[in-house]
Amino acid sequence: MLRTLALLAATGVFVLPLAAQDRGGGGIPRGDCVSPEQTKAILARVEAFRSKQPSAPGIASVDPERYPFQPFAGNLWDDVHTFNFVDLDPSFGLRDFDCLQWTYDTHRGHDTHLHSFAEMDRGVPVFAAIAGVVVDLHDGEPDRNINPSSLPSNYVILWHGGTHYSWYLHLRRNSVAVTLGQRVAGGQQLGLVGSSGNSSWPHLHFESWHDNAHYEPDAGVCRAGASRWVNPIARRRGAWVSDLNIGPGDFHAQPRLPNDYVRQGRWGTGWQYIGFWFQYHDLPPNTTARVRWLRPDDSVAIDSGAGPFGNPAGAVWDWVWFRWWVFCDVVGSWRIEIELNGAVVATMPFDVYTDPLSSPNRPPEPLQSIRFEPAQPSPGDVLFCRVAQGLLRDRDQDLVTQRYLWRINGAIVRDVTHAGRADCLRDDALRPGDLVTCAVTPNDGLANGATRTVSASVAQGACLALSLRGHGHADGSGKPLALGPGARDVGFAPDAGAMSLLAISLQPCGVGLPLGQFAPCTLPAAILLPDPVQGPLLTVGGAALAVPAILPWCFCVQGIELSPLPGGLGFCLKATHGYHLIVRC
Ligand SMILES: [Zn+2]
């Protein structure tokens, strides 16, 4: 019956409506990302950590530091997608920062998803959004969950100074790469995206806390105030397809996505039962859809015509599979074309051979582009290397990974292979004048694609950062600069109560101060510690130094740079673990 109908379809006499094709798919279950039990346990450990911090004299709380990048090895709205934001509706309703409903009730973070377990298995790193201290972590839990549950999650919790914490949940089993109490740099790898805990799909749940409450980093009509991202990324709107693959499987008999289906890019001539599946986003209700199968000469083999897709409700993100009989009457490169609401949103080629088994593997498609972010790196930046590639990543439908080979001045500093389309160097990696290079090579499991390389010279003499990381006012508002909120916020180690400056290296100190020593201020700038000084020790490069009783005092670290703050209010410098000291003339 199916064959008959398809034959009719292929000859154009009769086309089975899209809605009547053999199809399946589903929505993505939404539920509590973090079970109440686990939330309670994490908050208790955060409180235990906080209570151990030295207190400081009353300095008003300030805003949490902004995040310079999304904390994962992917490109948002390209290979990874944020599906749930923070629910800002205090009652049973749903409201995200844009007054949409891309959330679920009581959700406290951002859920950013991969396409499948297959990508998860090849690894997608999670990075510290900014420097911090590991205050809690958990690992060892199963990571292939597909149903909401009360299972515990693998996670890392970071403290960023003040009352600012960030949470990273659902990590892949045994992927946690940091230890309790460890200071981590911005951009340091914390683990890999997984589906541990209360999770229905491989995703990162990224949650932010400040002043004992979770908050939404994105600003919008329904979330007043400034964005807590340095470079906010606009939400992608309008129906689009993020993943389209072709395969031969009996989808009825296979586990649902995110278990990947068998893929196949090479087909024989004659009747072929070809399946395909895609993930779609932001679909309006009652969407119309159309599928066309096109021969190598662009002639239409099958056209479903535009018809109801079958979604009475809108969809933030869902997936569907179809399986069609296609009469492949000519050899060459065919393609399938998906149209939603009148616009072609995805195409995928497949190749028809007289003898498909005789064809050798093809390497991955060339990367479309490669770039650094920021394009002109400065010391202290977390430097991202981002690649672009379309829906077609490999003509054989193979899954593709990228090898990121990072060099600084010719020496390899990071060499990782994973499924994400971005990777980064930590914020303590770059020195003024360094030549930094990122070479990316795609691989389909059998062969490498062409390597693309991007390189840049690190700026000389740039300030590491002008933001005060929550410790003062860099807005030029005329408010006094102060170390805030609490001396513990300025980088006192959780155990020793010491303030650490590790491996600072920016500009040479210049004149007047011996390296690594305190002295009365003769330079045009002085570093002020909180008054009274709570941390008895300042450590530099691991060596403890007594804080002198003179205020203000100067301290010289090789390569430090002081940069003027707006409004002539002073200077800032940054330690590699992410805390600033305020410097006044
Ligand atoms: Zn979540």
Image (spheres, rainbow, N blue to C red):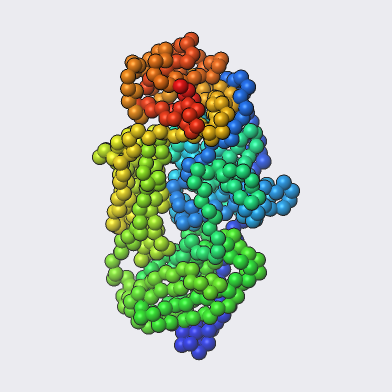
Q: Going by the image, does 91 lie left or right of 435? A: right
Q: Going by the image, does 129 lie left or right of 58? A: left
Q: Position of residue 576 (x, y in %)?
A: 42, 30
For this rendering, which residue is in front, 485 or 119? 485
Q: Going by the image, does 170 lie left or right of 402? A: right
Q: Position of residue 267 (x, y in %)?
A: 37, 73
For this rendering, which residue is in front, 484 or 119? 484
**Exactly how many numbered labels are in the figure?**
0
| Residue that sits furthest to the left in the current view | 410
- For residue 10, above or below residue 443: below
| Residue visible at 41% across and 74% down in the picture | 335
| Residue that sits furthest to the right in the current view | 91
Q: Position of residue 4 (x, y in %)?
A: 50, 86
| Residue visible at 54% across and 29% down in the picture | 471
For this rendering, which residue is in front, 161 or 566? 566
- For residue 342, above or below residue 72: below
- Residue 422 visible at all: yes
| Residue visible at 34% across and 38% down in the picture | 459
| Residue visible at 39% across and 71% down in the picture | 349
| Residue that sits furthest to the top in the current view | 549
- Residue 7 visible at all: no
